[in-house]
Amino acid sequence: MAPNRDAATAGWGAVSALSLCVATLIASEFMPVSILTPIASDLHLTEGAAGQAISVSGLFAVLTSLSISTVGRGIDRRALLLCLTVLMLASGLLVAFAPNFAVLITGRALLGVVIGGFWSMSAATVMRLVPKQQVPRALAMLNAGNAVATTVAAPLGSFLGQYIGWRGAFFLVVPLAAVTFVWQWLTLPPMPYDRDKEQPSALGLLRRPNARLGMAAVALLFAGQFALFTYLRPFLETVTRLEVSELSLVLLAMGIAGVIGTWLIGRMVACRLSTALILAPLALAAVACGLVALGTFALPTAALLTLWGMIGTGAPVAWWTWVARRFPDDTEPAGGLLVAVVQLAITLGAAGGGLLFDAAGYRTTFLASAALLVASALLGGLDARAGEGGSAEAQP
């Protein structure tokens, strides 16, 4: 029994190291949001041009997620994860010392490669680190790192930018990446690539009906979320009429609730995956409708958005668990496909939501978000029925 306990402990140590990597990655991705103006001023750019530093990382994340399972064939996954961590460190250095726009964009592109590569491999890596029944809990831990970083990245960037400048704020990624590298070096076991196993490409998985159904549900979920979430600030300022300090408190409450939500949904999917896939988007749709009805009242709006943060941040745990269960032999390309679909859905959802928000106002936008979320729930239900079925629900 002792060797098994030692292996389990080592596996969770590696999961903790990967969670720190997630937090560092996500903080790096979203930090420019709050320090865009000083970046533009220092590099003599328009704010629109500086904003491309955010979008370019998303583009390279999509390209990497679709190709890494093919490009990385034959490479030990431990070595590949360590190489991605080195790229994250290099990205931090390039951005912090960027003398011009070209170097800034190069650094952000490297970050996109790390984001796409890491997330594509995350479920497959976790499955090799912890016992099968503990995979949902491990995926929830990774998403908790995501939730924490998403909550603190923008305000932390703004705070640090005041005292050490935007370059200093980005440079802090470098020691964090170094710590992450050392921790992974010490805890990640060898994970050799199985040369005897033929894996499909990420896009090749779309030939399978269950993949098409699930990815359509994922796309609708994230498009629906970001059609609403992207425009929360103008909604809260103009409809609910919150002051900046009150708005910050609501966003903080959403972030804290998101950490709790990842834990709760991680527990749920361990025994009832299909329930989470159906109920999470339905609950978000109900919140969207509630905001339309009660958005002029501060306290109900704050309560509804706290619930949104709890469910919306935790929902990805369910879909990563779905990848691990539906594609146990092709988890890596399936993870890459999921990352690409999520990134594209976020982009389209935010763009479509913006068009509706400008043309028809928040009510139409939020109701459209609710419709997309209900459609996601319906497809989640179809997936549960079609399910590669009996094995999809694990016993407690």
Image (cartoon, grey):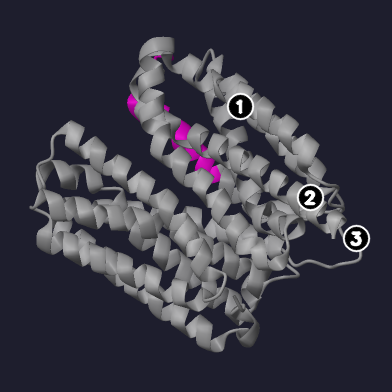
Q: Which residue is disc 2 drawn over?
A: 72
| Range shown magenta | 43-59
Name the spot of residue 321 as percent of width and height, x first: 59, 66
Q: Does any portion of residue 88 appear in the rendered image?
A: yes
Q: How many marks?
A: 3
Sequence-wise, the earlier of marks 3 and 1 is 1
Residue at 74% from the left image edge and 30% from the top image edge: 182
CA gap, disc 3 and disc 1: 34 Å
Amino acid type, residue under disc 1 in the picture: Leu
Taking the image as shown, residue 362 lies to the left or right of residue 22, namely left
Report if the CB atoms under discs 2 and 1 are less than 8 Å apart: no
Residue at 36% from the left image edge and 21% from the top image edge: 159
Taking the image as shown, residue 324 lies to the left or right of residue 51, namely right
Q: Secondary structure at mark 2?
A: loop
Residue 112 or 256: which is nearer the viewer?
A: 256
Most common secondary structure along the magenta stretch: helix
Amino acid type, residue under disc 3 in the picture: Arg
